[in-house]
C-alpha cells in the first residue's frame, strides 16, 4: 500500500499530523486488503465491476447501457443523456477513422480534437474548461459539462470531420488536421448563424459539477447499493426489502471503517 499512499502533513490543535492519502486505484487495493468480513460486500462489488467490464468489452451495448445508468445516478436529465450517448458514438466513429488513416493515438488525437473545437467554438478545450470553472477539476470531462447546444455543435463538428476525411481520403496527421479544421468550420459557421439569430452565445459557463451535498462518494455508494440489490434480489417484489438490507449493511460497514480510522489516528 505504500506505493499508493502519500502522507502529507497537516497541522491541527495536536500539532503536525500525517494524513494517509491514496488515488482511486490505491483505495481499491486497500479495500481488497482489509481482512474484516464487513468489507466483503465491497470486495464482491469490485469483483463484479471487473467481471462487467470484461463483458462490456465483449458486448459494447452493455457498456452503453452502463454509461446511461451512471449518468442517471449522477442526476443528468434523460434527454441530455441521449445526446451525450450519441456524441460518444460519433466520437468513436471519428477516432476509428483517424486510426485507419494513420493518425497516432494520444498527442495527435488531442491536437486534432483541439482543432475541431477551436473551429467550432472559437476556443480550445482547455479554455472551454476554464470558462466552465473546471480548471481545478483535473479529472472532469469537458463533454460531461456541456449544454445540449454545445453537445450538438460538438457532434456536428466531429461528424463533419469524419465525412470530409472520407470524401478527401485524408491520410496521416497533416491530411486529417486539414479535415478537422474544415469539419470544425462547418459547425462554427452554423454556431455563428444561430448566435446571430438568437443573440445568445452557444458556449456557456454552465456545468454539471455535483453540489456540495452530493459528493462522488455518495454517488458511488448509491450505485453500489443498486448493483447489489439487482444481484441479490430473487424477484422484483423482493427488491425493496433487499435494498433496505443492503443499505443497512453498507451503513454498518462505513461506520465500522470510520471507527477504525479514528482509532488509528489516536494511536498516531
Image (cartoon, helix red, strand yellow):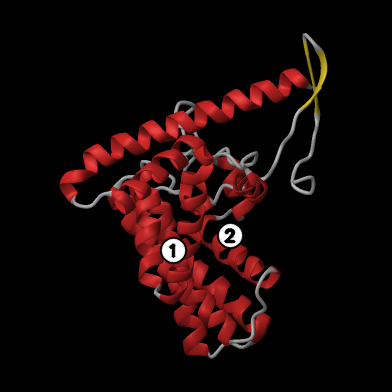
Q: Position of residue 203 (x, y in %)?
A: 47, 47
Closest to the observer: 248 or 181? 248
Residue at the (61%, 62%) spot, across then down: 114
Q: Is residue 114 above or below residue 58?
A: above
Closest to the observer: 7 or 119? 7
Identify the residue under disc 2: 118
User: Can residue 102 be seen in this snapshot?
Assistant: yes
Distance from disc 2 to disc 1, alpha carbons, whole Å, reads 37 Å
Q: Is residue 143 above or below residue 107?
A: above
Closest to the observer: 185 or 239? 239
Residue at the (46%, 51%) spot, across then down: 45
Q: Examine the image and state in which quarter residue 104 appears.
A: bottom right
**Looking at the figure, which quarter contains the C terminus?**
top right
Other-residue count near label 1 (Cα within 10 Å), few / some / many at <14 / 14–19 / ≥20 = some
Identify the residue under disc 1: 52
Other-residue count near label 2 (Cα within 10 Å), few / some / many at <14 / 14–19 / ≥20 = many
Q: Position of residue 102 (x, y in %)?
A: 64, 86
Q: Residue furthest top?
A: 13
User: Can residue 196 be seen in this snapshot?
Assistant: no
Closer to the camera: disc 2 or disc 1? 1
Contact, CB < 8 Å: mark 2 with mark 1?
Answer: no
SS of the residue under disc 2 = helix
SS of the residue under disc 1 = helix
Amino acid at each position: 500500500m505504500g506505493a499508493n499512499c502519500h502522507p502529507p502533513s497537516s497541522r491541527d490543535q495536536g500539532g503536525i499530523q500525517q494524513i494517509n492519502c491514496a488515488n482511486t486505484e490505491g483505495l481499491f487495493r486497500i479495500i481488497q486488503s482489509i481482512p474484516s468480513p464487513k468489507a466483503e460486500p465491497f470486495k464482491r462489488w469490485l469483483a463484479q465491476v471487473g467481471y462487467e467490464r470484461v463483458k462490456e468489452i465483449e458486448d459494447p451495448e452493455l457498456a452503453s447501457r452502463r454509461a446511461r445508468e451512471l449518468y442517471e445516478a449522477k442526476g443528468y436529465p434523460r434527454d441530455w443523456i441521449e445526446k451525450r450517448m450519441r456524441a460518444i458514438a460519433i466520437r468513436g466513429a471519428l477516432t476509428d477513422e483517424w486510426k485507419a488513416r494513420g493518425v497516432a493515438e494520444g498527442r495527435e488525437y488531442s491536437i486534432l480534437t483541439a482543432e475541431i473545437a477551436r473551429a467550432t467554438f472559437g476556443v480550445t478545450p482547455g479554455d472551454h474548461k476554464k470558462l466552465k470553472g473546471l480548471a481545478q477539476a483535473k479529472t472532469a470531462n469537458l463533454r460531461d459539462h456541456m449544454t445540449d447546444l454545445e453537445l450538438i455543435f460538438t457532434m456536428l463538428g466531429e461528424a463533419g470531420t469524419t465525412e470530409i476525411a472520407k470524401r478527401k481520403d485524408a491520410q496521416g496527421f497533416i491530411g486529417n488536421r486539414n479535415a478537422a479544421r474544415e469539419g470544425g468550420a462547418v459547425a462554427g459557421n452554423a454556431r455563428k448563424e444561430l448566435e446571430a439569430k438568437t443573440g445568445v452565445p452557444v458556449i456557456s459557463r454552465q456545468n454539471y459539477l455535483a453540489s456540495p451535498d452530493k459528493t462522488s462518494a455518495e454517488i458511488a455508494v448509491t450505485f453500489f447499493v443498486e448493483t447489489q440489490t439487482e444481484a441479490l434480489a430473487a424477484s422484483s417484489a423482493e427488491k425493496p426489502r433487499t435494498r433496505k438490507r443492503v443499505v443497512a449493511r453498507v451503513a454498518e460497514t462505513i461506520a465500522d471503517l470510520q471507527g477504525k480510522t479514528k482509532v488509528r489516528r489516536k494511536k498516531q
